[in-house]
Image (cartoon, grey):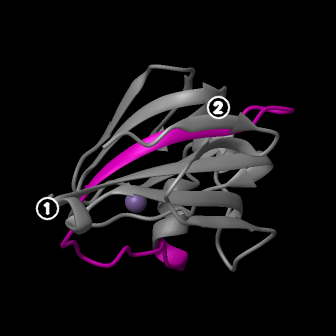
Amino acid sequence: MILRSREEAGGLRWEGRELLPYKESGTHFRKIAKQNLFGSGEGLPSELRYFEIAPEGHSTLERHEHVHGVLILRGEGEVLVGDRVSSVRPFDLVYVPPRTWHQFRPAPGSSLGFLCLVDAERDRPERPDAAALEELRRDPAVAAFIRV
Ligand code: MN
């Protein structure tokens, strides 16, 4: 089976896969679209998802027991993993270990598209409480980066 992709104004799109479109703003994420590409329907114990964050959007600041394997495909951006903010570009790999705070954001004027591999069965993400936010914000680079 081959499912073709095409590049649209809003990002990469694969045929035959449901698109969960941009939400202008959730409570804790912004301008992020998602497509579930592979998962239990293909007999896999993992899920491969494609996310595209529009300019000025961001993913949820969160942590959890399960890990992420991320492959950047499109655009430029910055990621927080743990206590470090790093810039990323296409084909960079980002590994998010267990229990590690993480957030993805496009660079100014850019969108950011990436594949994210996760366990199909996984724990629920945790968002930072006031104490965790205070801890994260001790580092000025992290404080300037995070969006909640
Ligand atoms: Mn996550």
Task: State which quadrant residue 9 falls in.
Answer: top right
Ligand 1 location (quadrant): bottom left
Instruction: Decide which of 84, 74 is in the foreground and name it.
Output: 74
Instruction: Decide which of 125, 127 is in the foreground and name it.
Output: 125
* Magenta stretch holds residue 129: yes
- Tell me residue 131's x, y (percent): 48, 74
Q: Is residue 13 left or right of residue 62?
A: right
The amino acid sitting under disc 1 is Gly
| Camera sees residue 82 | no
- Tell me residue 40's x, y (percent): 21, 67
**Residue at 45% of width from left, 19% of height from top?**
91
- Tell me residue 112's x, y (percent): 65, 37
The amino acid sitting under disc 2 is Gly
Task: State which quadrant residue 25 falls in.
Answer: bottom right
Q: Is residue 19 left or right of residue 131?
A: right
* 3D distance between C-alphas at marks 1 and 2: 32 Å
**Residue at 58% of width from left, 44% of height from top?**
142
Q: Earlier in the sequence, mark 1 or mark 2?
A: 1
* Magenta stretch holds residue 115: yes
**Residue at 29% of width from left, 67% of height from top?**
64
| Camera sees residue 134 | yes
Q: Which residue is mark 2?
A: 77
- Range of magenta residues: 107-131
Name the magenta segment's main secondary structure.
loop
- Tell me residue 118's x, y (percent): 27, 56
Residue 14, label in figure: none
Instruction: Decide which of 83, 7 is in the foreground and name it.
Output: 7
Closer mark to the observer between disc 1 and disc 2: 1
Q: Residue furthest front?
A: 1
**Is residue 63 shown above or below 9?**
below
Residue 43, label in figure: 1
